[in-house]
């Protein structure tokens, strides 16, 4: 059972990583909306992008990302794991969302962005773009609290899907 959850988590986090990576196709400037506001402002001032492009790409990414990750989580909890009580669906949803939160902060923000050439934007080498540990911990702490009530939403959807599917 534990191995099954580990495999599901790897697939879930793989989808997460793939979605992030897709938005950096053509260079990290296409995903500059991930960067701090000051960094984005400087990129605009240097003529590397525009506020309109950043806003549009951020919006498209968030809708795509939220939809894909929500569907994946509901399918895993409701159909694959066949959670049949709200409590079980809630705990599974919370577990997946909290692990995703930690993964995003450590693996994506600190390791991948911090050490990969993919996330370096030409013409912006003089500006730091990697979040400090303090920034990561604050953001992840806030998201950890947000996932507590939102897990109830995904649990409810998973139960609905489970009921319809079976």
Image (cartoon, grey):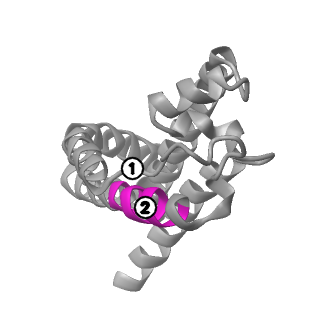
| Among the two numbered marks 2 and 1 on one chain, the one whose residue lies closer to the N terminus | 2
The local secondary structure at tag 2 comes to helix
Q: Position of residue 11 (x, y in %)?
A: 55, 67
- x 54%, y 24%: residue: 41
Q: Is residue 166 visible?
A: no
Q: Which residues are magenta?
A: 101-112
Q: Name which residue lies at 35% across and 42% down.
A: 154
Question: Is residue 141 or residue 14 the one in the foreground?
Answer: 141
Task: In the displayed orientation, state which residue is furthest to the front.
Answer: 126
Residue furthest to the top: 52
Q: Is residue 80 magenta?
A: no
Residue for badge 2: 110
Label 2 crowd bin: few (<14), some (14–19), many (20+), radius 10 Å = some
Quarter of the figure that contains the N terminus: bottom left
Give the vertical position of 47 relative to 72 (above or below). Answer: above
Marks 2 and 1 in Cβ contact (< 8 Å) = yes
Relative to 136, 27 lies left or right: right
The residue lying at 33 percent from left, 60 percent from top is: 102
In percent of width and height, residue 46 lies at: 68, 26
Magenta-colored stretch includes residue 108: yes
The image quadrant that residue 3 belongs to is bottom left
* Residue behind mark 1: 131
């Amino acid at each position: 059972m534990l191995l099954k959850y580990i495999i599901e988590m790897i697939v879930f986090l793989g989808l997460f990583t793939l979605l992030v990576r897709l938005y950096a196709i053509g260079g990290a400037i296409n995903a500059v909306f991930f960067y701090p506001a000051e960094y984005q402002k400087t990129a605009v001032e240097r003529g590397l992008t525009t506020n309109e492009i950043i806003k549009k790409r951020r919006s498209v990414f968030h809708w795509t990302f939220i939809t894909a990750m929500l569907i994946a989580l509901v399918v895993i909890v409701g159909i694959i794991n066949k959670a049949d009580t709200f409590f079980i669906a809630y705990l599974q949803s919370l577990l997946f969302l909290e692990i995703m939160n930690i993964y995003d902060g450590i693996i994506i923000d600190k390791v991948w962005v911090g050490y990969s050439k993919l996330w370096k934007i030409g013409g912006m080498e003089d500006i730091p773009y990697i979040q400090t540990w303090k920034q990561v911990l604050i953001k992840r702490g806030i998201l950890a609290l947000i996932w507590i009530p939102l897990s109830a939403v995904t649990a409810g959807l998973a139960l609905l899907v489970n009921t319809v599917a079976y």
